[in-house]
Amino acid sequence: MIDPTGPLPPAVYWRRRAVAIGAVVLAVALLGWGAFALLGGASGPQAVPPPGPPVAVAADAPPQPCADESMRVVAEVARPDFKVGERVGMSIVVTNAGDRACVRDINRLLRELMVSTPGGKHVWSSSDCYSESTNEQALLQPGQSVRNDVQWSGQTSTSDCKDGQGKAQAGDYQVMARLAALNSSPTPFRLTAAN
């Protein structure tokens, strides 16, 4: 039993026995180490590293107000031609043309749509006889726009709110948008006679 017998030389059998015994010893050692780590390690006090110095985390700064230079104001009309007496759809579009987010006050008293003749004669304004303030602080990402739509009835108006205003007649007109001190370029449109 101790002396190996078989067709192969005795050294081969001794090597096989040595490898088998080494594998068993390694397996027993690993099992013992694992049991100690689970049982013995869990019961002892755990070493906790001391906390390091506090780290200052910079909070995101709130967006700044939009500078006039970074804003774009445009007046738009729903289409180029309307019939006299038909409601004219128009809009003021305010866009952040800058490269960072900012906050812009677009209070109703700060924005205005103005209709005039091509020669500049006042026809109508969304601010004529209007005095209600609103709290509208828009956070605008770069390239983001805010649109306010208005339906003009075709009635003329004056800033002093006099009675007896009439209807705008057929002809060429233009609309401009204003936000505080910012003014758009005029956008032309036409009123045509109703059939």
Image (cartoon, helix red, strand yellow):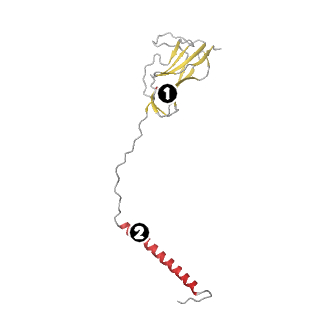
x and y, in percent, of residue 129 in the image: 45, 16
x and y, in percent, of residue 41 in the image: 38, 67
Neighbor class of circle 1 (other Cα within 10 Å; few <14, some 14-19, many 20+) is some
Residue 130 visible from this viewpoint: yes
x and y, in percent, of residue 147 in the image: 52, 27
x and y, in percent, of residue 105 in the image: 44, 27
Tag 1 residue: 71
- Residue drawn at x 55%, y 82% as measured from the top left: 15
| Tag 2 secondary structure | helix
Neighbor class of circle 2 (other Cα within 10 Å; few <14, some 14-19, many 20+) is few
Q: Quadrant of residue 116?
A: top right
Question: Which of pointers 2 and 1 lies earlier in the amino acid sequence?
Answer: 2
Q: Which residue extends farthest top?
A: 164
- At label 1, which amino acid type do we have? Met
Q: Spatial distance from mark 2 to mark 1, Cα to Cα?
A: 66 Å
- Residue drawn at x 50%, y 80% as measured from the top left: 21
Q: Nearer the viewer, residue 189 or 6?
A: 6
Q: Which mark is residue 37?
A: 2
- Above or below, comparing residue 173 to residue 29 in the picture: above
| Tag 1 secondary structure | strand
Q: Nearer the viewer, residue 179 or 128?
A: 179
